[in-house]
Amino acid sequence: MTEVNNINELQTVLADQQTAYRRSSYPSYRQRIADLKALKKMLLEHQDEFIDAMSQDFGHRCADDSIVGDILTSISGINYSIGRLKSWMRSKRRSIGLLFQPASGKILYQPVGVVGIIAPWNYPIFLSVGPLTAALAAGNNVMIKMSEYTPKTSALLAELLAKIFSRDRVCVVGGDVKIAAAFSALPFNHLFFTGSTAVGKLVMKAASDNLVPVTLELGGKSPSIIDETMDIKTAVSRFILAKTLNSGQTCVAPDYILCPESKIDELTSELKIQYQKMFPSIVDNNDCTSIINNAQYQRLQGLLTDAQEKGASIIPLSSETDINESRKMPLTLILDSTDEMSVMHEEIFGPILPIISYKSIDQVIDYINNRPRPLALYIFSFNTHFQQKILFGTHAGGVCINDAAMHVANEDLPFGGIGPSGMGSYHGEEGFKTFSHAKAVLKRGKISLAPLLFPPYGKAIHKLIYKFFIR
């Protein structure tokens, strides 16, 4: 089976999945484990093919970027779910108040039904297989809309998933923006989207017509704050991989640095030293991933041009200039940026790093809080007071202290944004719950005292109950 690329076919596939779900609305633990193990086996057996397909889609993608960012993270997520699924599926007892006794209460986690997943291009396997893992663990049927920017990867995923799942259980959808819009408007039981804030608004609006619940994993400008007392060499070593992995095309990559005014020069020098150790060359270096396509490359170049024309200093950390054809870009620093520059409003999503000076921690907190809430926030300090003041004084989807981006790869930590950077969360148990309905179940036996509350009102028992419970 190839991926679905026809708008008319979307309704047919959805109807087939809804019918299939009604036939098996609560897959057994054994079935769910078998599904997850089959998914894992497929990834392990075909990881080289996925790495090659992703590289073709990018023009060139470092194999290790694909291994670390897509294969390892996806396998880890599946393993984590397999090891804990029995506990997640177990109904949870809840207490029933004295007024409603005798009775028992529990929460039953029931699959929501048919889940739609819209995956982006930057980590096409991890950001499709990750939510797929959670949806399958929760017992759902799934339709996945892949990005038109990754046609090779999408076709391969569709082909391989079709070998282990019927189309009415798991289906991959390809196609362009029109198909994506039609996909967003389908009456799913839950719609999961990863992508930009601007597109996320459109997805949520389309879903609202059918009152479809949504989880939005968006982006934003994730700040990194360096404490005055922090060793700069250590700080750089803790965030530089997060900024250079996949050439910065990562939703949780550090978007800009807030650095003490007195340490700007030291930070700039240390960034250059560590970057050139990692990437001594750019164009002929297989470790350097290309920007996904020419439109994205030109967008990034436009951010640099706009900043320079408005007075910023542009510092590429490589002297190579003949990079246009390969679409490879060195990490490029921006100093003296201002709010008039586009780079300080748009999510960068590439190897560009503005550095902003500050004089006090209160200035840092005000700067962050005066902007849309970010998907991630990074604190570089071994001072507990500094850490706590930033942690409790700001909002972000997730935080790393003396690290960057690694919280995303930890399955026991929920991943999600807040406000403009997202809605809802997944990974681990949070992913299972996102794609489940927590059904409340109150159960009575043969004895029920409820008739004591029946009309006509004003009896002594009513007065006694009101007196006892309304206080």
Image (cartoon, rainbow, N blue to C red):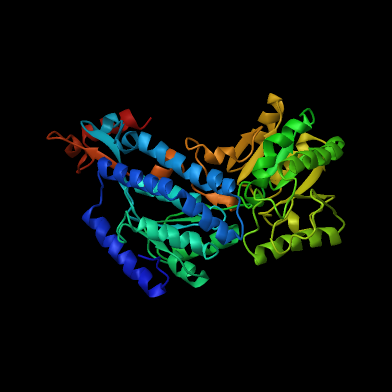
Q: Quadrant of the N terminus?
A: bottom left
Q: Is residue 406 visible?
A: yes
Q: Hey, which residue is sitting farthest front in the picture?
A: 284
Q: Hey, which residue is sitting farthest left in the picture?
A: 446
Residue that appears at 42% across and 45% down: 44
Q: Is residue 212 visible?
A: no
Position of 428 with respect to 295 (left or right) is left
Image position, residue 312 (x, y; %): 85, 54
Position of 324 with respect to 32 (left or right) is right
- 285 lies above or below 278: below
- 126 lies above or below 97: below
Position of 209 with respect to 257 (left or right) is left
- 260 lies above or below 315: above
Of residues 290 and 255, the one nearer the viewer is 290
Image position, residue 21 (x, y; %): 27, 56
Q: Quadrant of the rendered structure where residue 389 is?
A: top right
Residue that appears at 27% across and 32% down: 99
Position of 432 with respect to 279 (left or right) is left
